[in-house]
Amino acid sequence: MRTMSWRDGMAGLLACGIGLGGAVARADTASAVRLAPIVVTATKRPEPLRNVPMSITVVSGAQLARMHEVNFADYVQTVPGMVMVASDPAHTTLVLRGINTEGTGATIGTYLDESPYGSSSALADGLIMTPNIDTFDMKRIEVLRGPQGTLYGANTLGGLIRFVTNPPNPKAFDDEVQAGMDETAGGGFGWSTRGMVNLPLSSDLALRVDGYRWKHAGFINDPTRNARHVNGSGEKGGRASLLWGHPDAVTVRLTAYLQDMNLGGTNGVDLTTVPSTATASGMRISLTPLYGPLAQGRAVAETSTVRNRLYNATVDWNLGWGALTSATSYGTYSGDQIEDATALFGTLERAALGEHKLTEELRLASVGEHRLDWLAGFFYTHETANLHQALIPTLTSAPLGFVQLNSSYLEVAGFGNVTYHFSKAFDLSVGGRWAHNRQDALEFGLASAQGRSSEGVFTYSVAPHWHPTANTMLYARVAKGYQPGGPNVLPPNPPPNVPATFRSDTLVNYELGVKSRLLEGRLSIDADLFDIDWKGIQLETVVDNFGVNGNGGTARSKGFEWQAAWIPLERLTVRVGGAYTDAQLTSSTDPILVGARAGAQLPYIPRWSGSASANYTYFRRGDLSATFGADWRYTGRRESGFNPALGQANLPSDSEFDLQTGVTRGRWTLEIYARNLTNRRSIIEIDQGGAAITQAAPVGDVTPPRMIGLTITGKL
């Protein structure tokens, strides 16, 4: 890390990126207003964002609150190059830089403070289990683009999303309460309540507790059952964190996180297939609604529940010459879902997934100002999962049959990173990680099978960075990431080309970037070029109604990203960002199992995407102020997932526009906001297997329509 004094660093620091915090820093003169400073922990040590040699977007807690961004659907589109694919708020997939083929393993890692969150295994549907964490009382969200295999390990091919919560503060009491209500176009009313309290218990002990509960109205109708608003959703949860100690010696932080989600149905709209047309990369299909623009047909309500629990103990010990950190986490997940599988099996399907995950990370890092900064660590995780699927004639009847898949994932790894400061202007960072995993799988019920796999993978990163001036950094980065392979549990008498195991897929990311601040700290620019080679990509297909994983050929993703923030006037802050991503297969896949040809666009990745926002304080007098904000998000044309029978469906481009205004007096703020003001509809995912009761029709998951809401936030 580049050395600087704490005072100089905080005084001159500029937060490069689109998410630079909602506030601005006022200098000694009234005319000099600068973008607020920020420090990140992306490299597992506190470091100024403008000195980190990789592309990072930071969304501050203030910005999340201003834009009422409480889950993935709200803020993903403001991160350049990030895409969300989701059938509902509980089953989400995040994609960065186009790294997605709709396999079953996650390609983006998720951390809550020091805790890795979500499944490491493709056998436990890690792809669609990305934790959708409520952002109330969040300090910031760090989105690291490009593979993070050196410091964060498996399933970070595309990048990492890190939620950083506000820690307990033993110095002062604090509290916050919030209540809100909203109306969804074509749906109904929803509501939300949130609260936080920080209690100093002594000079070195504090407790911070926050909780929330909300309910959103559904907007999907089912004319076959004469049911309205079938996809309503509700959630409750919170965090409790206890902090003891002193930063100059030892600190211990204990944290518990709970989340319960209840969903009345999916955001799916049943579609009909318009005849396919041939393209250079295969067949392409077009789709139109079957029952109407926001309608589906189901034999029963497709309800689901999700229960997340995460517990962490982090100990930081300042040794003087180094900092020793131990982070121990234990998490559980349980989910239950009803699906109408009438078109496929002539019955309903109930799926239940349970996971338990224990993780330990121990690392030692240098502290102070040295020519050589270093970090070394050890990582261990053990995960078990039980996936149960049963066919049931009705919701209350006994199963006609079931299949259960029990799996375990065990990984150990060692990692390290060094940064050598050749001069005040030039640094070189080098890192490496060796990881070994062993997996076991046992399937029983309608079919009986078992499998085992064992493999080791080495990842690395190299990042030279040069500061031609105090306010500009140029950097290059080469980094490798991977996704663990694993065993397949095969159907009886499988075809000869179905593999018993699938290998890790790996990619290498080449990146050039610049971070700069201009106009005396009122303008920041962060831009980069990237080129990714992806080998042995993991693909999922269905063989005799069994999900099977395999390795395809190669793919390439290349493009550029940009983000900037500007304060043209004292009370006006403008942010823009965007990405161009060209992500394609460079070799054809199995024509029977996957059916994608070389040149096919990787699923759900738009070539062009972008966002812009402006926030203006138009009145300020004493403790009374008023603000106005506008946000615009654009997603370009993209293709759906691969399907050997139907091909890919074209999803047209779309844009959304939000507005918000608020009045603050003293400790209280009243805000009114509108999301998707023009009530645009966009399909973000297509399930070509189908679930409609009348035919095996594709289902398109859509974005929510216009929502208008009001919140009151304050301190008691």
Image (cartoon, rainbow, N blue to C red):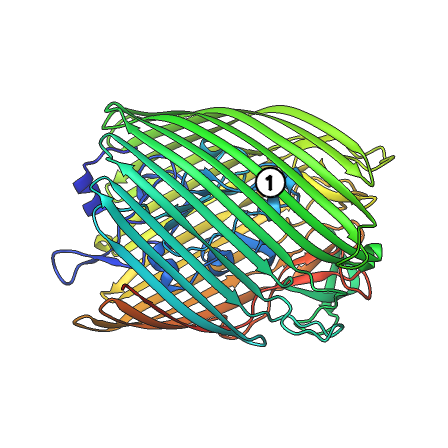
Q: Quadrant of residue 487?
A: top right
- Image coordinates for residue 621, horizontal then vertical, percent: 18, 73
Q: Tell me the SS state at disc 1.
A: strand
Q: Amino acid at mark 1?
A: Glu
| Quadrant for the C terminus in the image | bottom left
Closer to the camera in the image, 164 or 235 = 235
Q: Judge from the rendering whether residue 447 lies leftward or rightward of residue 291; answer left or right.
A: right
Closer to the camera in the image, 288 or 548 = 548
Count neighbours of disc 1 (C-alpha within 10 A) and say few if under 14, some if 14 to 19, many if 20 or more: many
User: Does the rendering let one see residue 242?
Assistant: yes
Closer to the camera in the image, 491 or 285 = 491
Q: Judge from the rendering whether residue 373 lies leftward or rightward of residue 340; answer left or right.
A: left
Q: Residue extending furthest left?
A: 28
- Image coordinates for residue 607, horizontal then vertical, percent: 56, 54
Q: Judge from the rendering whether residue 77 lies leftward or rightward of residue 11; answer left or right.
A: right
Q: Is the residue 482 above or below the residue 660 in the image? A: above
Q: Is the residue 31 above or below the residue 492 in the image? A: below
Q: Residue at x 33, y 42 (%)?
A: 242
- Image coordinates for residue 698, horizontal then vertical, percent: 74, 60
Q: Residue at x 65, y 74 (%)?
A: 228
Q: Which residue, given by chain and number where applicable, does mark 1 sit on?
A: 355
User: Does the rendering let one see residue 81?
Assistant: no
Closer to the camera in the image, 151 or 519 = 151
Q: Residue at x 72, y 52 (%)?
A: 350
- Image coordinates for residue 223, horizontal then vertical, percent: 73, 75
